[in-house]
Image (cartoon, rainbow, N blue to C red):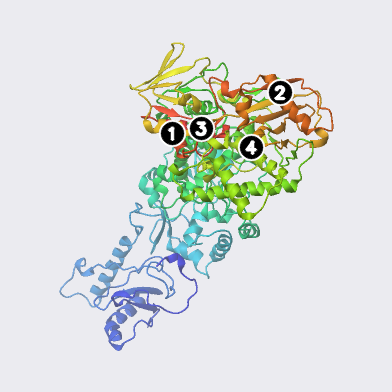
Amino acid sequence: MDGEQRSPKVIKPKRPFPLRNRKWCCCYSDALIFSSFTTTKKETNLFEPFIKKLQTRNKVHKLRHCRAMLSDADYSGNASGTRRAKKRSSEESPGESQTPRISGRQTNARVKRTNNPPPGQSKRKATDTEEEDDQSEKKYRKCEKAGCSATYPVCFASASERCAKNGYTSRWYHLSCGEHFCNECFDHYYRSHKDGYETFASWKRVWTSNGKSEPSLKAFMADQLLPYWVQCSRPDCRKWRQLTKEIQLTTALAATYRCGMKLSNIKMEGPDQCSQPEDLRVAEVTDSWWHSMLILPPLLKESPAGPFLAAYYPDCVGMSPSGSLSTASVTELRADHCRAVQSQIPGLCPYFQPFYQPNECGKALCVRPDMMELDELYEFPEFSRDPTMYLALRNLILASWHKNCTEVLTAEKCAEHIIVRGLVRVRCVQELDRVLHFMTRKGLINTGVLAVKRPLLPESFCSKNVIVIGAGAAGLAAARQLQNFGTQVLVLEARERIGGRVWDDVSLGVTVGRGAQIVNGCVNNPIALMCEQMGIRMHKLGERCDLFQEDGKVTDPAIDKRMDFHFNAILDVVSDWRKDKSQGQDSPLGEKVREIKKNFLQESGIQFSELEEKVLQFHLSNLEFACGSSLDQVSARSWDHNEFFAQFSGDHTLLTEGYSPLLRRLAEGLDIRTNCPVQAVDYSGDLVKVSSSGGSQWSAHRVLVSVPLTLLQKNVLRFTPPLPERKLKAIHSLGAGIIEKVALQFPYRFWDTKVQSADYFGHIPPAPEKRGMFSIFYDLDPQGKRAVLMSIVSGEAVPAVRDLEDKQVVDECMKVLRELFTEQEVPEPSSYFVTHWNKDPWSQMSYSFVKTGGSGEAYDVLAEDVQGKVFFAGEATNRHFPQTVTGAYLSGVREASKMVSL
């Protein structure tokens, strides 16, 4: 029976020891009154000799109270002591009540008897000797917690006037090895007639209102009365000191405390307090068994994670309910079960939402604050049974990082925010390093364009040197991470520039991305993180997209909405079709779309108008833009394989300055060799040898290959020995998509009147065969005065412009614009450029897709390392986020983590 679940009210007497017929008797002055437990005449007769003995001893020693444990077979004399227990409620369990002070020794073994002692002398000697033995025997009592190392516990509470201090008490309550409180202090707060009861009751009301765990007296003691421990901030000391219980620990005190600091109620003497030895209990905390002996998990006060997790019960996410929001605000938050948006925190970037809110799911790079992830359980199995300490530390670290992502987050910065009473704070600070290193290694914190002055990880993680092939987003991300970890890195790039398929052009007066320029979903996106670190503003793209016909008319939004519905309905039917289809039963997506559309029209009797058919073709061209290929090459079974994973949500934005500033910052301080096209990778020996076409050669323990998929498909890099058959099959099951761009600069903004400051407008194709030819136009300065439009060529339209000269492509684009703006004069462009990614020797593609007969699993296979020596990164290795700069960047972070973990 748990002593903390007792009711303070006395209801009726109960039998506290139901076993072995134990009986209680209570003696008040000269009268001995049996409780209701002695129910038979036989039992009364049995105890008559003992009753007389007790009455005699009470008169001699003038005892006011005593209790004795009696049994049918044996009974012993009572023991005296300086502290006497008051009458207990008869409903208490043996663990809750004062243990009877009896010695159990036979006094006749220690008293020298004579043949003819004076009358009464022998009896008095025996009684006196018995009491002396009792006092020496009962001066100390061990903690009853099995495995507790405290031989002589000390009460930390000192709440009751009758506190046992370091003496005897009927029961020691165990919080940890080294932290106990006595039964007298327990009663001081637990008993309704005691002075401390109202304090406990008031705390319990707050705890119950805000928290979910049991508001036990042990929890009260741990939350309110345990003394704080603080570490000396001197680098050459770092000893732990216990504060008096009156001192409240703050982040400022934790950050600046030094041994001997003059605090209220603390007097330090001596010139060098750091020379004083550390409390021996601190050394025990480092042992692995200490955590297993902890009765209650640590619940932090004033955690930086608090504002992020206001909708959660604090004690479910590692925080104390006694220092949480007001009851009204908590009730309001938790009553809103549909709440799926994090409350806006002042000064925090709105795209930073590292924690799932209750009932929320499907958000990328988000963690459950009340649950450990699989990789966390694998790394920290000791917290699998009770993850509270880990969750408290992980949530604190994540919140602290997102509140200030411009500086390296260190254990010292986090430790000052660990506000929790007791020795468990020592353990939390000790565990902090492990958790911080794990999260740093995984790229959850201390990532992005952060510059570091010293390695982020211990030297044991950084013993191998690495060569990175390719200075695109993936290669630079991996190199930056590895160098920040402390690893020696060399980057080899075939081009004369860095960036890979990120290539920004500023020749038209504004930044135009020849490659990527849009961020799809900014919430928790690492691109948004890097923009925040660099102070770069992202332009939010609006949802409005008017569709213009070739006679200049604007398409009725109702028609657009209706055809968008039919378009999505067709894709839903494709999803139903593929549920029971194997990889060998795959079909081209384009073929499946036509089949489903035909069946629908036949079965429903509906006929699309000519305009509706054209609008449908526009939506299909948009799908080809997303896939990077004609739908006739895309797998109907796996075209949206990544949608099975949480994706980035929130705003879609345009990087008005392009991706280049981010990549340049990532490259700062790295050893990058441009104009070094690698042609061979030999991993047959202990070291991996890398050779360039110019004859140069390098060697390293590990090599990261971050080249585009096409170069692997065409064997531009030769591997010795050849790559495993499984990986080769995966490489060839993916397609290399192509889209091209056309950017036009005009002398003035002729489209403003019609488009009305929208970020983009669409072009309805005049015929299915024209689908994908300049289907959408982006205004690259919608709020400004510069007149620059950028359009896309995708799908079947790509081969049509492949062999055209740039001027011919521009002329085709101008024809479309003049047909869309028939009511006004469209000037000739003053400048322009056209991309040719299909002819770029070091890319030959835009981004990947799953070919017919392929599978999304190919991305995972392509990401597998070979013999722990050759690693692979790039958007084509990221199953969750393919086809994006974000996916490429995260693949580099992933491989860096993998390499230092081996």
Q: Looking at the image, tell me whether mark 3 or mark 1 is earlier in sequence order.
A: 1
Image marks 3 and 2: residues in contact by CB distance under 8 Å: no
Per the image, label 3 sits on a secondary structure element best described as strand
Tell me the residue that label 3 is attached to: 735
Mark 4–mark 3 distance (CA, rounded to whole Å) = 18 Å
* Residue at numbered disc 1: 730
Mark 3–mark 2 Cα distance, whole angstroms, equals 28 Å
> Residue at coordinates 39% horizontally, 65% vertically from top-left?
82
Identify the residue under disc 4. Answer: 621
Mark 4 is on which residue type?
Ser
Most distant residue in the bottom direction = 41
Amino acid type at image mark 1: Ala
- In the displayed structure, would residue 68 be above or below residue 552? below
* Residue 86 horizontal/vertical position (percent): 44, 71
**Residue 271, position in %: x, y?**
49, 34
Closer-to-camera residue (404/239):
404
Q: Is residue 690 above or below residue 428?
A: above
470 lies above or below 215 = above
Numbered disc in front, either 1 or 2: 2
Q: Position of residue 251 (x, y in %)?
A: 57, 42
Numbered mark located on residue 323 in the image? none
Q: Position of residue 1 (x, y in %)?
A: 39, 67
Look at the image and tell me whether residue 446 can be seen. Answer: no
Is label 1 in a helix, a strand or a loop? helix
Which quadrant of the view contains residue 834?
top right
Q: Amino acid at mark 3?
A: Gly
For disc 2, the marked residue is 810
Label 2 vs 4, first from the N-terminus:
4
